Image: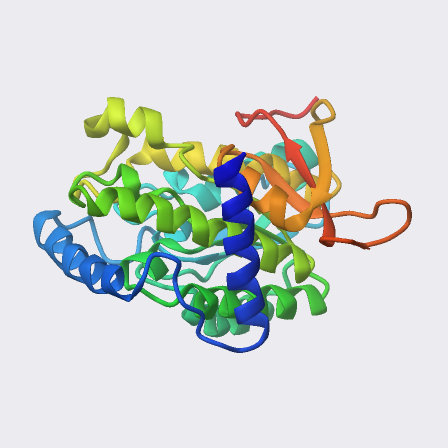
Amino acid sequence: MIWTTGAARTARRIATAAALGGGGLTALGAITYGLLIAEAAVARRIVGQPHGLNGPDSDGLYGDTYPGEPIRMAVLGDSTSVGLGLTDPADTPAVIIAHGVAAVAERPVRLSVVGLSGAASADLGVQVDRALEARPEIAIIFVGANDVTTATLPARAVGHLQKAVRRLRDAGVEVVVGTCPDLGTVRPIAQPLRWVTRRWSRQLAAAQTVAVVEAGGRTVAFADLLGPEFETNPAEMFGPDRFHPSARGYSQAAYAVLPSVCAALGLWPGPEPVRVEGSQYLLAAMAVEEPGTEVTATHVAGRAVGPHGRWAALLRRKPGPMTSG
């Protein structure tokens, strides 16, 4: 609980700096920024090259055997959004989610993937422009890892993400954000910087959660969702470059997000999740310790804001493949 309380304070400080338009100082210090940049450069030289530069083309209509008007879905963000390193579109997170939504809704899904490998939060503005052209009903964003590896000031990264979510919500789009994954599982990043990136990743994820909830979206924590299996079976869970996930690793990310996407669309078919209500700052810190948890805004006693900030709900769902019926 001591770490969680400290993480809540850090998330609040970063989110506040973003709201005020400041750069925000990392809790890990300026020297660490320089070390991380140097370590990231070494890691990039060590890792191999993935297949292609931006993943397979995944745009299209999925679940076309179902009747009805297609659900319009956009996927934004970094290499996770495009499935970098994969060759079959069916293995990408975007297509897995599209198929899952189509099965649950029993309607086709029109998918538009506007993400880009290497993208950071600062690149979301252009992606939102492209996504809105498709008039999506729901947008899924995977972002954060490149903000860490490029040593972007956390408040600056969070500010860009919050602006993107607000633009989408103002256009009537439901938004689900997969927060920054735990980069401490990446082997080419050596110790002690691997520990630093783990802490940095989680602090950023907590601040992302606060910002997204305030903007009207919902988040899903990746945390160490892939950590245990990546540590135990790195050859199976990582792709050829030892940095990006394999098809199996990407599928775990997709199935973690799928329940929240269905819930945002009013389609959740499973049992009611375990629900915890409280301050958004505390729940954001809790979420980064519990992979697969969703955080969204809520009201307590008819109020959206409490004595310690906006009220939020943390929802624990068991991720996994879903089918209709």
Classify residue 313 as left or right of residue 153.
right
Classify residue 229 as left or right of residue 81.
left
Judge whether 207 appears above or below 243 on screen. below
Q: Residue at x 44, y 58 (%)?
A: 77
Residue 86 can be seen in this image: no
Q: Residue at x 49, y 73 (%)?
A: 125
Instruction: State which quarter of the image contains the C terminus.
Output: top right
Judge whether 182 appears above or below 104 on screen. below
Residue 222 can be seen in this image: yes
Q: x, y percentage for residue 192? A: 19, 43
Which colour style is shown?
A: rainbow
Q: x, y percentage for residue 62? A: 54, 43
Q: Residue at x 51, y 34 (%)?
A: 256
Judging depth in this view, the residue of 199 and 148 nearest the camera is 199
Judging depth in this view, the residue of 99 and 11 nearest the camera is 11
Instruction: State which quarter of the image contains the N terminus.
Output: top right
Q: x, y percentage for residue 6? A: 50, 46
Judge whether 318 appears above or below 83 on screen. above
Q: Residue at x 21, y 47 (%)?
A: 193
Classify residue 226 as left or right of residue 243.
right
Residue ranking furthest to the right? 302
Classify residue 233 as left or right of residue 254.
left
Q: x, y percentage for residue 99? A: 54, 37
Residue ranking furthest to the front? 2
Residue ranking furthest to the bottom? 21
Quarter residue 257 falls in: top right
Quarter residue 104 falls in: top right
Judging depth in this view, the residue of 270 and 200 nearest the camera is 200
